[in-house]
Image (spheres, grey):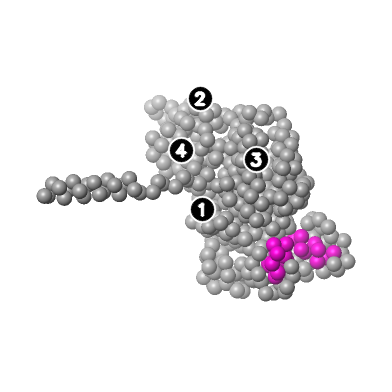
Amino acid sequence: MIGAVTTSAGATRTAARHARPPRPVRDAELAGGTSSAILRAVAGGAATDRAALARRLGLAPSTVTVKVGELIAAGVLVEAGAASATGGRPARVLRLTPDGGCILAAELGRHHARIGLLDMSGSLVRSSDLALDVAAGPEPVLEELVRAWTELRGAIPASAVRAVGVALPGPVSSRSGAVDSPAAMPGWHRFPVGAHLSQELGLPAVVENDANAMALGECTALGAAQGEDDDAAGPPSGAPANLLFVKAGSSVGCGLVLDGRLYRGATALAGDLAHVVVGATGDAPCNCGNRGCLDTVVGGSYILADLRSRGIDAHEPMDIARLVGDGDAVATTRVRAAGRLLGQTLSAVVNFVNPDAVVLGGLISTLEPFVAAVRSQLYENCHPLATRDLRIARSVAGADAGVLGVGQLALRQALTSL
């Protein structure tokens, strides 16, 4: 009887093991993270041989050997020469292969795009701006984007491109590569941007929300600026583990990095500050169909419309910066009011999330009256413990934050595909 019971229990345990759900597929943001960290360390000169990589990244030597072997086989790394050694067999020196490949990235706004070319360490090689109108629809806009990428590549052959990444100003499913219900992108709803680009270019394509991409790009830039060790499976450890990146451009948005990982939410809507209804905005209609959204006061397109209604010549986002820089009283007052309302709204988020840093990006965030108003409201309205060690600053990555962030995602997708 005892044997029968034991057999039955063993069978039950076996059945339970087989009944367990499969492990979820790792997100493209994390997959290939060890390879990405190795490439960053080698490119930056922080570690140029296998033993140094193991020490630098806190990895087992066997793991480093396997990953370095994969990267050499893929033509991304080359091992040659010899490092100086005090004794024993000298270490072989690792370097990026000069023609090992590149990544193309773009961050689209409503009326412009920032495009960039990154090397296989994730470093930005070159970037440029492109005028376009997302309201023209996905196919013509993406066609124009591909042409611009071709020009940016220059003499680099198409075969050297390993992957592409695009950041879009709307809720994006990072898995399907489609925008879902964007407020100011007619014709883009559920258009398969990632699949379209993959089919057009024959490459892996990553699509992400612009504020999320900027948050990741800022983490990358902060980690590089501080020169600290890189995390093998996430953003550089020199970056804050908990960061709110607030984009204030034509529209307002927020990307959240929590415990070193990008937080997207259940339906990729996390951080969508633009359509939070705020009583102080009054009853102004928003392009989302609702009234009283934060965007109607803070969004650059609404600021421009407000200035024009007051007889001020303002048609481009740069006109706002020009007017504030010239000391125009109406424009400065309007921008300061936008900063105050954003700061008041962010206060609840800062108290709730308790981040290490609030980083302000986008064109409006380059204006000192706006930044000062946001900062003053956070200090005034947040709990003292929430702001005691809080860093509130402009973006270090600046205009390249979006391409840096989505470029990192595309790089990791490329490394996973090798």
**Residue matched to label 3:** 196
Q: Give the percent coordinates (x, y) of residue 195.
A: 61, 41
Direction from residue 2 to residue 74 in the image, left or right: right
Q: Can you say whether 406 is above or below 251 in the image?
A: above
Examine the structure image and report whether residue 263 is included in the region drawn in magenta.
no
Q: Residues within 10 Å of mark 3 (few under 14, many from 20)?
A: some
SS of the residue under disc 1 = strand
Q: Which numbered circle lies on residue 261?
A: 1
Q: Give the percent coordinates (x, y) of residue 112.
A: 75, 49
Which comes before the other along the chain, label 1 or label 2? 2
Which residue: 63% across, 69% down?
345
Which residue: 25% across, 49% down?
12
Residue type pointed to by label 2 = Gly
Which comes before the other along the chain, label 3 or label 2? 2
Which residue: 54% across, 73% down?
383
Which comes before the other along the chain, label 4 or label 2? 4
Q: Residues within 10 Å of mark 2 (few under 14, many from 20)?
A: few
Residue type pointed to by label 3 = His
Image: magenta residue range: 286-308
Label 1 to label 2: alpha-carbon separation:
37 Å
Q: Residues within 10 Å of mark 4 (few under 14, many from 20)?
A: many
**Residue matched to label 2:** 81
- Please state which of the two labelled residues, at mark 3 or mark 2, is closer to the viewer: 3
SS of the residue under disc 3 = helix
**Residue matched to label 4:** 53
Q: Quadrant of residue 284?
A: bottom right
